Amino acid sequence: MRNNDGNLVFERTPYISGYASVVGKKEGEGPLRDYYDRIIHDSYAGKDTFEQAESELMNTAVRVALNKGEFTQHDIDLACCGDLLNQCVASSFAMRSYAIPYAGVYGACSTMALSMILSATAIESGAAKRAVCAASSHYCTAERQYRFPLEYGSQRPPTAQWTVTGSGACILEKAGDSHNLLNHHTELKSNIPPSSGDDPLLKENHRESQTPYLHSARLGRIIDFQITDQNNMGAAMAPAVVKIGIKNNGIKHGIKP
Amino acid sequence: MRNNDGNLVFERTPYISGYASVVGKKEGEGPLRDYYDRIIHDSYAGKDTFEQAESELMNTAVRVALNKGEFTQHDIDLACCGDLLNQCVASSFAMRSYAIPYAGVYGACSTMALSMILSATAIESGAAKRAVCAASSHYCTAERQYRFPLEYGSQRPPTAQWTVTGSGACILEKAGDSHNLLNHHTELKSNIPPSSGDDPLLKENHRESQTPYLHSARLGRIIDFQITDQNNMGAAMAPAVVKIGIKNNGIKHGIKP
């Protein structure tokens, strides 16, 4: 793995060997409805509180991702999970039913990216061969957490954002280690050169097998423009996106702001 | 780096090249008072709220750690920080004044260990040469968060634990990269063998120069015995310590439970 002036370039091509998305009713009625693994119509997901429901979404997403990848929990070396709740309770309660070494992360909207970056770093270091990454949110818990409990019946401005009810999970895996890999992937196992992230053959193989993999990443830093409108959290995040995501990172990759 | 059945063995001997501790009044009156870098007698640390005070403790700890290591923020590739507050606000507000790529972590009492493990993993992978790890807590914010706001004047049982008011920070660094290293350390820079974690020479050098370094680590998993006594959180953590820390890890290292 190279750190190219803040751009982390992965050399073991950590790729996604299992994934799942579990969403709520509203998401299940949207244009992406055919792509979700589970649509749960009950906001409580059969539990007593919205927070327990969110935890259940993540628990289900991890279970489905493991199943789709044909893994058991014992195949996984690391879980990197987070959510928006106090003390990341959705994640820790979701993951207590799995016997997987656990790292809680908090990145707000960037939690899924953060968990994938840290998991890929662990894979690059040799700490893990396979890691599960997961993040969750729930409209009803986020409203309580960041604005007002729904029970208050507060009015929201028409432009207010709507937090997703759902959880996504994926299994990240070191190239060459999966029982799911195509043969020509397996051949790469024994000797992946340090520059394999830019290896045209490896890229071609990934493309052929339709396996998404992590090429590079850049960890953000905190840029605060003192935005305090709780109904417009996008504005709070935009400066970091411009500074880190577009100006620093995009230009290096030939993307114009 | 090797993952030996869950024991992560570091091979680049990530070592501590800067550190600081900043504590509150009560800690500053205790038996360790001579070892702290700063003792802040004002519970508010000159701020308006206890939460802002906690954030200030971490900000100070990171600044002092950088200074003691003779680093600037631009020498650091990664910050891995966490605390006990909702959405890890102490950490994110503390770190917004540093231009360092930031990963928020949540591990409750294990936050400092978690941030050091993830930072060391990043160093092992090549993602970072130097990382700052930090964690904080504050008696007054923790009481509000986990029990009752102090303003209520609730009575606590005499056996209730007392959350530390303080923050610790350290700089973890890949062996051989520091301008602070002794000469015989620097000689090791160019060619650290994969097994250097067990290299007696390297160990000897570390011991000679009194530089603490990370040898190995084990990430815990969540073990829940349904303890709900908010005044005895130690009982909630004990099962994981026994299972992961002593039974799994200790025995491997010849430590008897």
Image: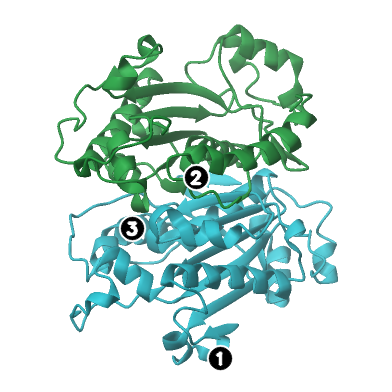
Chain colours: A green, B cyan
Amino acid on which the number 2 mark rests in the picture: Gly
The dot on residue B34 is 1
Among the 4 quarters of the image, the one containing residue A230 = top left
Q: Is residue A165 above or below residue B232?
A: above
Asked if residue B191 lies left or right of residue B112, the reply is right
Asked if residue A157 lies left or right of residue A41, the reply is right
| Viewer-side residue, B184 vs A215 | A215
Among the 4 quarters of the image, the one containing residue A156 = top left
Q: Which residue is mark 3?
A: B247
Q: Estimate the spatial distance between the alpha carbons at disc 3 and disc 1, rounded to whole Å.
A: 35 Å
Q: Are marks 3 and 1 on the same chain?
A: yes
Amino acid on which the number 3 mark rests in the picture: Lys
In the image, residue A239 lies at what x, y percent? 64, 42
In the image, residue A97 lies at what x, y percent? 26, 40
Q: Chain of mark 1?
A: B
Crowd class of label 2 (few under 14; some 14 to 19; many from 20; radius 10 Å): many
Mark 2 touches mark 1? (CB < 8 Å): no
In the image, residue B257 lies at what x, y percent? 32, 66
Q: Secondary structure at mark 3?
A: helix
Whether residue B251 is visible to the viewer of this picture, yes or no, is: no
| Viewer-side residue, A12 vs B147 | B147
